[in-house]
Amino acid sequence: MNCNRYIGSLIIAVLSFCASAQPIKVEVVQTNSGYQLLRDGKPYYILGAGGQVHLDELIECGGNSIRTWSLENAQKYLDEAHKYGLTVTMGLWVQHERHGFNYDDEIAVKKQLDYFTRKVKEFKDHPALLMWGIGNEVDLFYSNTKVWKAIQDIAKMIHEVDPNHPTCTVTAGLDPKEVALVMRDAPDIDIYGINTYGELKLAVDSIDHFGWKGPYLIAEWGPDGHWEVPLTKWGAPIEQSSSSKAKSYAKRYQLIRAEPNCIGSYVFLWGHKQETTATWYGLFTADGSSTAPVDELYKAWRNTAPPNSSPAIENFGIQRNGQPVPDNILTSGARFSAFANFTDPDNDALKYSWEIISESTDTKAGGDAESAPPAIPGLIKKRTKGAIEFKAPKKEGAYRLFISASDGKGKVGYTNIPFYVSPDLNKRQGVKLKERQLDFSY
């Protein structure tokens, strides 16, 4: 085939697609009962997920929208969403002061605005586009409030070049200071976005009192954050089990749905990632299995139970000689046992997995990328259904025992137990005791 002819045909095809792409108008309207999003003139409540993978599962659960945090692979994600009948809140990653960006640098700020102007013009007519998410948690560890004026310039530009899609900005939690700054310095923001976890109820109860009377969305929500949970005596955050998280998701979704000015939400995270642990926020495991919180979203969005449910964790713990180990502080090199009792709502046979992993030291803020510590081989000496015998690591320090149970049909339940290895239980060398109540009953 003639190469020039092929390239010419491809260009014509692309231009033809671009010419035929028609934007679908999205707007926010005020009703007698609150605010409502309209898409193509019809009410549109966001049943959304933060992430760009497992779109088949999102559709199966009844979801209708995805959220991105940046323009990376924007064309791909818009096209894929459109193929599935989903919409996209397209993120514009406004640079963070904590990453070194200087909002006193007018040239850098103008360069950022110019970049977004080009990109908004490029994607504004895509039929999958729902709204523009201008910045995510720019208020995290910041001091220069000029960032809100930069966000205003971006929002104003969008209103000038794209009359079909509203603007949104997202803060880390909800603080009256940031609400006031957005209202004062960024009046072209149409929708206030909140990332909130354990304090979701406080956020939805407070936003009106903090002065924001317009529409808002819960841009991220999920389990209790790693900064919100009880700590062990050596300072490790205690993660909820998948079953405990499922209860949190169910309760928090009902809080969201009851808010008249809330136009929807994006659950976090529709995928898998390492953040404090490998299981803390992801609704899916590394191998693509889904978890109990996904079942709860299915129930909430479809008002019926899923055809297959995830295994549920009932109780678990570390023992020595049949007795609980005080505070889960283990003697270096000594032998212990652990148990985990899972049940399956569908009576599926369960396959257990056990791993001992060092406590992560590569912890970051704001969802920045973290590396996952590897599993430590050779410590698990005996396995039976729902129980193991293992040898404590020789090296003093903090660890976690990760336990999961798979039903063989793509569903998994999990938990993890933080423990500390000490060479001398009487001295407890290296353990920084904290007056916190330990709770392993999730």
Image: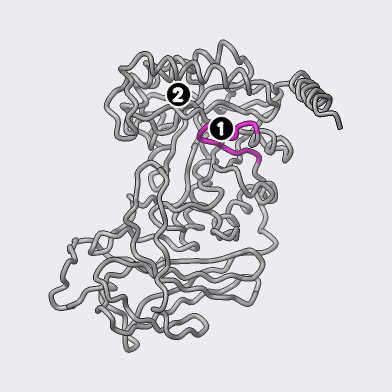
Q: Is residue 264 left or right of residue 438?
A: right
Residue 249, position in %: x, y? 50, 52
Assess whether residue 97 is covered by the magenta stretch: no
Circle 1 residue: 263
Work out whether 118 lies above or below 53. Answer: above
For mark 2, give the secondary structure.
loop
Residue 431, position in %: x, y? 19, 66
Q: Is residue 62 left or right of residue 171?
A: right
Tag 1: amino acid: Ile
Residue drawn at (70%, 21%) of the image: 23
Residue drawn at (42%, 14%) of the image: 110
Sort mark 1 into few (<14), some (14-19) or many (20+) by Cα contacts within 10 Å. Answer: many
Circle 2 residue: 213
User: Which residue occupies the foreground of this view, 241 or 149?
Assistant: 149
Find residue 117 and report its image quarter: top right
Q: Do residues under tags 1 and 2 come within 8 Å of each other at their CB atoms?
A: no
User: Which residue occupies the foreground of this view, 252 or 79?
Assistant: 79
